[in-house]
Amino acid sequence: MDQLSFDPPAASGSDDPSGQRSGARDSLMLSATLRIAGRSDVTVRIRNLSAGGLMAEYAELVHRGTALEIEVRGIGWVGGAVAWVAEGRIGVAFDRAIDPMAARKPVGRGASTPVYAKPVLLRR
């Protein structure tokens, strides 16, 4: 099936503010839940993450400017909009800045974490 593809906007010389990105992006591979009004929630793979947005693998047709929400581990639900669309990927510009390092914090070792979700530690 054919899919419309739009290349990400160029970072320089563009009048579009979504193409004028700044700040470091953290490359990673992280699952997240993506919610777009009128569609079922889907699991996507985040490929890079910054305070202002992310790039995720998403093969469905979606247009620039489409409002969405994404739940990122360690951060929670964040609102945003599609900034660009390329073959099998989307760029998301967040409505508010986040701490991208919070997504890298370990999970499953807290006192309130159920026993079945904690790693098994063997004593010698």
Image (cartoon, grey):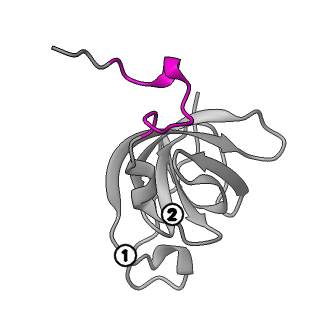
Q: Is residue 17 magenta?
A: no
Q: CA distance from mark 2 to mark 1?
A: 10 Å
Q: Position of residue 62 (x, y in %)?
A: 66, 48
Residue at image coords 45%, 56%: 102
Residue 37, placed above or below residue 18: above
- Left or right: residue 96 versus residue 90 is right
Dot 1: element: loop
Quadrant of the rendering where the N terminus is positioned? top right
Badge 2, how many Cα within 10 Å: few under 14, some, many 20+? Answer: many
Residue at image coords 64%, 43%: 34
Q: Position of residue 117 (x, y in %)?
A: 49, 23
Using the image, tell me which numbered label, if any, was put on residue 23: 1
Whichever of labels 2 and 1 marks the residue nearer the N terminus, that label is 1
- Left or right: residue 26 versus residue 80 is left
Q: Position of residue 42 (x, y in %)?
A: 65, 33
Residue 118: quadrant of the picture: top left
**How many numbered markers are drawn?**
2
Q: Main secondary structure of the magenta part?
A: loop
**Which residue is the extreme one toward the right?**
38
Amino acid tagged 1? Gly
Q: Is residue 115 magenta?
A: yes
Q: Nearer the viewer, residue 91 or 86?
A: 91
**Which residue is the extreme one toward the left?**
124
- Which residue is identified by label 2? 53
- Left or right: residue 63 versus residue 5 is right
Amino acid tagged 2? Gly
Dot 2: element: strand
Q: Position of residue 31 (x, y in %)?
A: 49, 37
Residue 123, placed above or below residue 114: above
Range of magenta residues: 107-120
Residue 92: quadrant of the picture: bottom right
Badge 1, how many Cα within 10 Å: few under 14, some, many 20+? Answer: few
